[in-house]
Image (cartoon, rainbow, N blue to C red):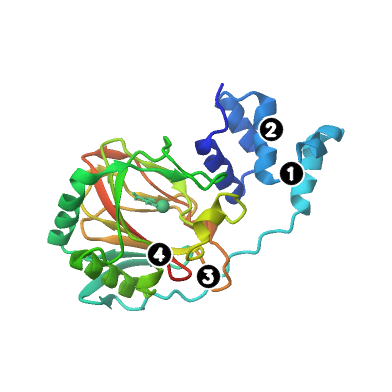
Amino acid sequence: MPVVDAEWEEWLSSNVARGCSMDSMTDAMVQAGFATEAARAAVHKAFGVPLSIAATAATGATAATEAVLAKPAPQTYQYDESPVASGNVIRAHDRDVRVLMRSERPQLIVFADVLSADECSEMIERSRHRLKRSTTVNPATGKEDVIRNRTSEGIWYQRGEDSFIELLDRRISSLMNWPVENGEGLQILHYGTTGEYRPHFDYFPPDQPGSAVHTAQGGQRVATLVIYLNDVPGGGETIFPEAGLSVAAQKGGAVYFRYMNGQRQLDPLTLHGGAPVLQGDKWIMTKWMRERAYG
Ligand code: PD2
Ligand code: ZN
């Protein structure tokens, strides 16, 4: 019988955030092989509803639903102005970056030419021999776990580690119009054929105990830039299932998305993942920006 491991914890928290019902989540867990009581207990815990409320009531499901409804409704995310410049071409430090597409809800922009083809190849060659299996933050503990929903290998570069990395950090900061000091180091990820990253949020869910470890320095993540370092022959798109959008990997291109507004609300429409690579492999470089100076 399955157990509620880090992968299931992540599944539970992202489905609560997406607004799934307790019944549908319990059914899905039972379908996956959990005993009904174990599934109900895990789902109740994820919603923050004590199981005893439901168990002692004659109509358990109704009591649990009422308890959920009694919680203050989360405020609808307010879309305020993005820091990214307007226009079809943005001067980003030393380079002109073309805008291919903008979405307002979620706030998302697709770019071309963030890196030149030579810069992409250089990043891949620097990283190829230094990759390690990627981890995911366990929402309960804040620790990094290797889990099945993220089948990639990666490497981090410290901010300003050498002149090439520093140039890229500056260009990206200028494009995102967010201070270079607020950026995490660049991360390179490599996926082989079949590699994928199941849908998740890049922000640290505020209601998860493990998030505090990550936000203690620099605060919450506010926006992401995923840069594609190669053309992927098949699959490997960055998908936004709640928004019904997908972005194909094009060498040197990128997708920007912003999920924290000026009121510190977090946008659930930015749920996203890396679709399975069907042919060839996929290389990306990611920059996460924080609220405040980081590192
Ligand atoms: O590989 C991607 O396209 C992807 C998708 C979603 C990467 C990430 N998230 C990430 O590194 O957070
Ligand atoms: Zn992500």
2 relative position to 295: left or right: right
Residue behind mark 4: 295
Q: Secondary structure at mark 2?
A: helix
Question: Observer-nearest residue: 20 or 136?
Answer: 136
**Dot 3, crowdedness within 10 Å: few (<14), some or many (≥20)?**
some
Residue 37 higher or lower than 127, as above or below? above
SS of the residue at dot 4?
Answer: loop
Q: Are marks 4 and 1 in contact (CB under 8 Å)?
A: no
On-image quarter of the C terminus: bottom left
Mark-to-mark CA distance, 4 and 1: 37 Å
Q: Which residue is mark 1?
A: 49
Numbered label tally: 4
Residue 41: % across, % down: 69, 33
Q: Measure how far apart labels 2 and 1 are at the Cα level.
A: 11 Å
Mark 2 — residue? 40
Mark in front: 3 vs 4 = 4
Q: Position of residue 96 (x, y in %)?
A: 22, 75
- Image point (63%, 31%), residue name: 27
Whether tag 1 and tag 3 are in contact, CB under 8 A, the answer is no
